[in-house]
Amino acid sequence: MSYNIQRIKVAEIVRCISDLMPHDPGEASCELILTLDAKMESLLCELPDFFKAELAESEETKQIDQSYPHIPVQRLLINLLINIFRCGLHFPYLPGRVNKTLHAFSRQASLKAARVVLSSQRDMSMTDMSHSADFMKIQGTIFHMFIGALVLTTDICCNQDGQMQLSELMDVLKKLDDVKDHSKMAAKLLDILMQLLVSYGVWPPSTTISTYTEDATPLESVLSGYEGSRLDSLDMPFPFDELWETYIGQPYGLDMLDVLEV
């Protein structure tokens, strides 16, 4: 029951975002974005202690987990859900083009949320979800890896000072590369991310996951010979808002979350 209540609260905030956000994110005021983000932060703070990710290792939470084996999965999913929507709220402002005033705040908020999404994916063990079909679990985790990776990739491409983000991204890309022969979704999403890195000059066109891993070059060195003026052009190689809307913003996107609790 607690989990369902939290899902309802998330749905109420998402409906509020849908009602208040203009069709063009550039028309949203800073006050509106800060207010909507504060609602999500409040929701995280008001979660029952046994649903708070930062308290997952406390003795009290561990005892609850032992008594109620479904709680760890529900904790993971509710935190995943909130942070996916938080990524979506701030994603239009991450490249720094739509609203430069919001850029710094939204960048930090979206990176923080993306890291939680990726951390949740890492915590998604098969034993915790033995009641779900393996294929659907794999597809669901791949989808959530892509959400976090898209935020990291966008930040690297547009802000070009993310050596730590590049290291984090490589961990995700290697995981997608490992399963691409077994999942068309993984292969497709990996290709999108690599195209972004190549298009923005972060990687040379011939780079593969294996060659980059074997001969990694610091991001600063890669970008030193790259013409940053392309990023100031009105014609970006990839429209980031369209990427999000196409692969994440559609209704079937969040269905990938639900298959993990079937």
Image (spheres, rainbow, N blue to C red):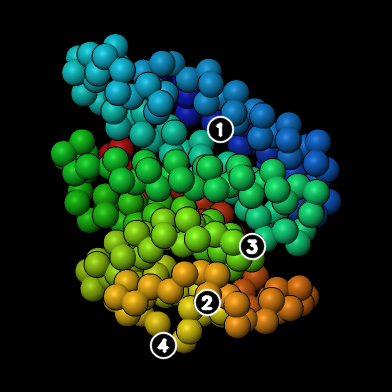
- Front position among marks 4 and 2: 2
Disc 3 target residue: 159
Whole-number angstrom distance, CA of label 4 to CA of label 1: 44 Å
The quadrant where residue 201 appears: bottom right
Give the alpha-carbon distance from disc 3 to disc 4, as whole Å.
23 Å
Which one is closest to the eye, mark 2 or mark 1? 2
Q: Is residue 66 left or right of residue 29?
A: left
Helix, strand or loop for disc 4: loop
Q: Amino acid at mark 2?
A: Val
Point out the tag, 3 or 4, that comes first from the N-terminus: 3
Q: Is residue 213 above or below residue 67?
A: below
* Image quadrant in which the N terminus is located: top left
Camera sees residue 184:
no
Assess disc 3: are there few (<14), some (14-19) or many (≥20) residues with their C-alpha within 10 Å of its C-alpha: some
Circle 1: element type? helix
Which of labels 4 and 1 is toward the front? 4
Residue corresponding to mark 4? 206
Q: Which mark is residue 222?
A: 2
Looking at the rendered structure, the kind of residue marked 3 is: Asn
Label 1: which residue? 11
Q: Residue at x 83, y 51 (%)?
A: 27
Measured Cα–Cα span from mark 4 to mark 2:
14 Å
Q: In what quadrant of the picture does the C terminus appear? A: top left
Residue drawn at the location 66% of the way across and 35% of the way down = 37
Are the two marked residues, 4 and 1, in contact with CB atoms closer than 8 angstroms?
A: no
The nearer-to-camera label among 3 and 1 is 3
Pinpoint residue 151: horizontal percent, then vertical percent.
53, 56
